[in-house]
Image (tube, grey):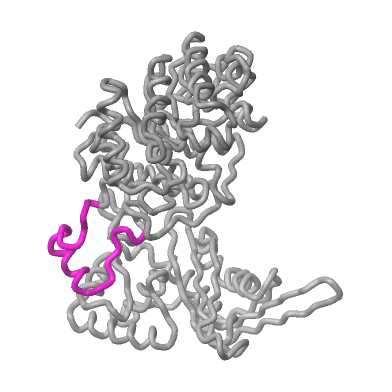
Amino acid sequence: MADIQLYDATLRDGMGGGGMSLTAQEKLRVVHSLDALGVHMIEAGFPASNPKEQELFELLAGERLEVSQIVAFGMTRRRDVAAEDDDGLRILAGLFTPACTLVGKASLLHVEKVVRASPEENLKMIADSIAFLVGEGKRVLFDAEHFFDGFALDSGYALSCLRAAAEAGAERVVLCDTNGGSLPPQIRTALAVVSEALPGVPLGIHTHDDSGCAVANTLTAVESGATQVQGTINGIGERTGNANLVTIIADLQLKMGTNVLAPERLARLTETAHFVDELLNRSPNPAQPYVGKHAFAHKAGMHAAGVRAEPQTFEHADPALVGNGRDVLISELSGRGTIVEKARQAGIAADGDLAQRVLERVKELEHSGFQFEAADGSFELLMRREAGEYEPLFRLESWRVTVEKRGEKVETEATIKIWLGGERYVRTAEGNGPVNALDKALREAIGEIHPHLRDIDLVNFKVRILDEAKGTGAVTRVLIDASDGQDVWGTIGVSENVIAASWDALVDSLEYGMQGARRPAPAPGVPSSGRV
């Protein structure tokens, strides 16, 4: 299989998705992340469209990249305007970027209804625009917009658009499934015709996911002769999104035998995917292929036992190759093998009896509303209790929270009374809510004795109503995520009183953070957050 070129459109096409927005500085960080990953070409944006895009290109002019080439995006000349007089084309001609991507219509429907030009004029718009930029010393890629729809409508005209681009000097023509409605058989048929009609012309593929087939269509195009794949990180983009370049990269490398990235760069795939989501203020999709938190997670006891004996029994790829890790999820569906594996990770000696006791306790707690998949910290503490290795931070005498509204201001105060090392501690603290006040009071009471607690921050807080029919009297589940700056762990509390549930999750988060010295160091390439 020929070498495949990776073309990322996150910063331009990806921003068309709902809620997607990055500053120029944030886009610059994405560029460096993609360069570290090893993406060959990065479509940085449409500089003629708005000042933010222009700012980004000004910033990029002073940057040095190791692998990636920056590409500027633009459109073919306007109708009835000479290429050399088109403002957008002149901006592209003056940029530092050696390569440009021009989009032009390849469907008669769009030529007639959107561009409102004759078929002949559209062909001239394509040819004139490319010839002008080539004459200005630019390498030009042509994005044949709506190609597959246009091919289905009038294949002869769609091919004429590609031919006009190639004859004008385009180094590559990219076939675009702009509406995302094509299926793999249609992609395969069109690619066969294009390859025969334009022998020797390098082809690219650009798909959208409206039919759920963007990745499949892209891989089909590669099998049919395309040597460039376009997509976005995590598949972001207009409507249902673009082809997910993350999945495409892993599939090409691990399934189709194409060495698109060096192994050490492929191992950055998970990190890159999560980095882009974080910049966009999105929670990473836990079910995303290869890089999701649950991509290599095993819940059923038989599955956990299987991967312990031989990973290939229930894993299609080695998670470490893409920078991910195996995870064992705990639930009432778990078997003893799952418990033994989790105990091993935590440095707890576990035999069949302990595993059975833990499993029965998990089933009992989940029946009352607990859920340990996202509460790895609380589950480790449960195992330590059953193993006789649990040492509480303190003994609680009582806690009290008062909330008072005075005018427009709400004041919250918490008082705790605890015993620690034979001493009684009483502390009061104010906070911006009950949990924050309890957290402050508790840390004030034991922070000097356990200074490590100062390094632990609560980074997420979630409340879920478990039996909505009971309204405000319903049982609530509270999940807290905590971090010491290196690892992140989850803890859980369940009660009819939301503050009591929050207190239980809060105490577990701090107690788990104090268990670090008991855990074995993670194996090389294994995340330290508890994944195997």
Between 122 and 506, the one lying in front of the other is 122
Residue 137 lies, with reference to residue 281, above or below; the image says above
Looking at the rendering, which quadrant does residue 147 occupy? top left
Task: Tell me if residue 303 comes above or below residue 499 in the rendering.
Answer: above
Residue in the foreground of this view, choosing between 217 and 1: 217
Q: Quadrant of the image for the C terminus?
A: bottom left
Name the spot of residue 250 as percent of width and height, x first: 29, 44
Question: Is residue 404 rendered to the left or right of residue 293?
Answer: right
Which residue lies at the image location 33% right of the left edge and 28% below the top edge? 203
Is residue 294 inside the magenta stretch? yes
Quadrant of the frame with the N terminus = top left
User: Please, is residue 262 above or below residue 414 in the view?
Assistant: above
| Residue depicted at x 68% and y 76% | 428
- Work out whether residue 261 can be spotted: no
Q: Nearer the viewer, residue 264 or 510?
A: 264
- Per the image, is 218 magenta? no
**Quarter where residue 246 is shown:** top left
Is residue 343 something one can see in this rendering? yes
Rendered location of residue 290, percent (x, y): 31, 52
Left or right of 32 in this view: 386: left
Position of residue 375 measured from the top left corner of the image (x, y, whole percent): 41, 71
User: Residue shown at 30%/55% (left/top)?
Assistant: 325
Q: Which residues are magenta?
A: 293-318
The percent position of residue 522, horizontal first and vertical second, equals 29, 55
Task: List the single residue furthest toward the left.
Answer: 309
Residue 483 vs residue 408: left or right?
A: left
